[in-house]
Amino acid sequence: MANPVVAIVGRPNVGKSTIFNRLAGERISIVEDTPGVTRDRIYARTEWLGHPFNLIDTGGIDIGDEPFLTQITEQAEIAIEEADVIIFVVSVKEGVTDADEKVARILYRTDKPVVLAVNKVDNPELRADIYDFYSLGFGEPIPVAGTHGIGTGDLLDKIIKEFPKDATNEEDDSIKFSFIGRPNVGKSSLVNAILGENRVIVSNIEGTTRDAIDTRFETEDGTKYTMIDTAGIRKKGKVYENTEKYSVLRAMRAIDRSDVVCVVLNAEEGIREQDKHVAGYAHEAGRAIVIVVNKWDTLKKDNKTMSDFENLIRQEFQYLSYAPIVFVSAKTKQRLDKLPELIKRVNDNHEQRISSAILNDVVMDVIAHNPTPTDNGKRLRIYYATQVAIKPPTFVIFVNDPELMHFSYERFLENQIREAFDFEGTPIHIIERRRK
């Protein structure tokens, strides 16, 4: 099941981004215009009391030069379309405004739960003013102060109560994968070409996301796949056609439901900043990843073209050093036959388990040849390692003091584990714990 999606809407200057950052637990949505910095995302993965969910700050969706009321309208429409729960933020300082009522009228059209958050209630005297907001018609207002974190626990309690109940899923042993990427990289063409290559289609099924249709197919070796549709029904209006950040919102649910994510790049256009945003989300979600360079047929090539492009990818996506790269063409079907086999291989690696005995043989051999570092005369001691999870493979290493594990030595250990075992295509998580 995909994580629930919570969208924050409201007119400008009510503190949407402040509440977003507070709920996300880190300062993600930033005011400064900092091109290429992934912290300026408008989405975050977070959780409350064991309930993970995705959070969207619609105020960060740039609608262009439209009047602000039009921007509010279109941002609220996106929230209605994408969210399971909507946080409607208003400000106690200004009271109920015409713009608040405009947003309220839009939200009346949805059958999704709306939680009303009255922001900037940073002293007890202002609490009496929140009752004016009952007039908006969304029940009891929740007083919060995003800047100080006051009331956010009550807000989160209310949000998770409104989450949709998990549907009971039938057992599904297929490998679920999706194509993600910015607009016009050729995702739809790849979907059609893959289905043309693999004509043994089992069924078309409704996805757990609204407007999405998942396609199941089976290859000649009997492997079953479910291709998750990231496009859904094509929307009208330039907010859906031209807003690149919107494509990230579409990809979020697909990533959550995928075992393997195929990050699609356009060979003609090269690598754009938006490619890094989308790929970064898949990496953070711990999914297995394949980098697919589409439209490879359109380039004039020599004997260095492929290696040069691969070096560029490795330079721009350093955090995806584990991800295999395949150069394809949806138009000519070049190398498309290799893609399902590659998806299966990285999925197998994603759910691979290593026995503790074999893992510790490798780790102790590494330590013997490359002793652990010291800090202020105190040496890091590694006692034992064990794998505690798959998807992604997660290892706990018991040590004398986790503070002594420098990130460079942790990276070294990860590289040695990768050398010993085939984890191509999957991230690895390493957790240090003090031995009791």
Image (cartoon, grey):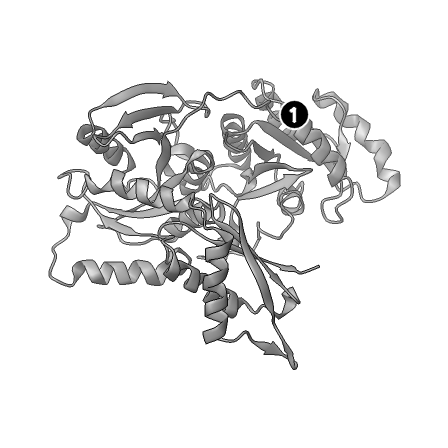
Is residue 222 in view?
A: yes
| Residue 88 vs residue 70, the one in the foreground | 88
* Quadrant in which residue 160 is drawn: top right
Identify the residue at horizontal 63%, vertical 47% (top origin).
Answer: 21
Residue 20 is situated, as x and y percent measured from the top left of the image, at: 62, 43
Percent position (x, y) of residue 112?
A: 59, 21
Where disc 1 sits, the SS reads loop
Badge 1 density bin: few <14, some 14–19, many ≥20, Cα 10 Å: some
Return the residue at label 1.
162
Answer left or right for 297 relative to 206.
left
Please provide percent x and percent y for residue 120. 75, 42
**Is 245 in front, or is 51?**
51
x, y percent for residue 141 = 75, 28
Question: Residue at the front extreme?
Answer: 357
Q: Is residue 181 visible?
A: no
- Eyeballing the image, is 400 above or below 319? below
Instruction: Tell me if 390 is positioned left or right of 217 in this view.
Output: right
Query: Residue shown at 46%/56% (left/top)?
Result: 358
Which is nearer the eye, 239 or 388? 388
Q: Is residue 195 above or below residue 280?
A: above
Whether 35 is drawn above or below 82: the answer is below
Check disc 1 and give the amino acid type: Glu
Q: Quadrant of residue 203?
A: top left
Q: Residue at x 51, y 48 (%)?
A: 41
Name the quarter where the C terminus is drawn.
bottom right
